[in-house]
Amino acid sequence: MVTYKYHGRILVTMQAAKNPRELRSKAIADQGNQVNKVNDRSFKVKSQSGNGFYEVKETKEGITCDCPDFVYRGGKCKHIAATRYYLQVEKDTPGGVVTEKVHLTYTQAWNAYNEAQKSEIKLFDELLKDLVKAIPEPEQTIGRPCLSIHETLFCAIQKVYSQLSSRRAHGLF
């Protein structure tokens, strides 16, 4: 059995790998500060042979790396395996060794979210006005003049969507 640790935490406890690529990936994960998170779906893994870094990305097609081994061979390289070991954490518990996945946290762009919330009402009003104007107005031949169908529909939909009274919704038209 071989145990690999990262900052005092046990990363992987397994039988020795037969594949040299797996051994090198475990060595990368074992050294610490070799795998750095760039964003939610991208990691930089330090090269063992030089001073550079290789980027490991999660895409729709799977996990990719920009190292020559992955580009020319096409299989899982040591950088991808090191990233996987980095994300897998094994902890010793009284009941034995438990494997937990490191949950990646996603930052919320609160400024963009707040702006979208503010502009949503204005955009909805504009789109709704354009939509109801496309409805043909029926010709009124008898009776008192009534509200146009455009205004009536706008107010009714606005009342349901924004929970405004018809009187207040009419002011937006």
Image: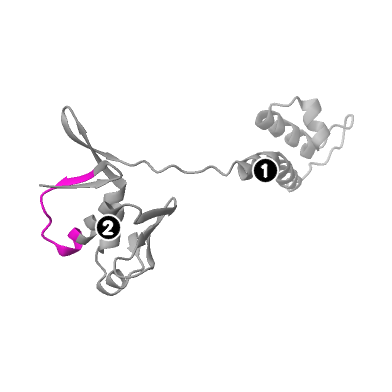
Cα separation between marks 1 and 2:
43 Å
- How many residues crowd around disc 1 within 10 Å: few (fewer than 14), some, or many (20 or more)? few
Q: Is residue 78 above or below residue 84?
A: below
Q: Amino acid at mark 2?
A: Ile
Q: Is residue 39 magenta?
A: no
- In this rendered view, identify the residue nearer to me: 154 or 48: 48
Going 28% across and 52% down the picture, which residue do you hit? 84
Question: Where residue 72 sits: x, y (%)?
Answer: 28, 75
* Residue in front for this viewpoint, 54 or 41: 54
Per the image, the residue denoted by label 1 is 115
Q: Which mark is residue 28?
A: 2
Q: How is the image coloured?
A: one colour
Q: Position of residue 2 (x, y in %)?
A: 13, 48
Vertical position of residue 162 compared to residue 116: above or below:
above
Residue at point 76%, 46% (across, down): 133
In the picture provided, is 28 more to the left or to the right than 16?
A: right
- Where residue 93 appears, x then y in whole percent? 20, 30
Residue range (magenta):
11-23
171 up-or-down from 82: above or below: above
Amino acid at pointer 1: Glu
Magenta highlight on residue 12: yes
Secondary structure beneath label 2: helix
Q: Disc 1 or 2, which lies upstream in sequence?
A: 2
Q: Residues within 10 Å of mark 2 (few under 14, many from 20)?
A: many
The secondary element bearing badge 1 is classed as helix
Residue furthest to the bottom in view is: 72
- Indicate left or right for 30 with 18 as reference: right
**The C terminus, quarter of image:** top right
Please say if 53 is above or below 127: below
Of badges 1 and 2, nearer the viewer stands 2
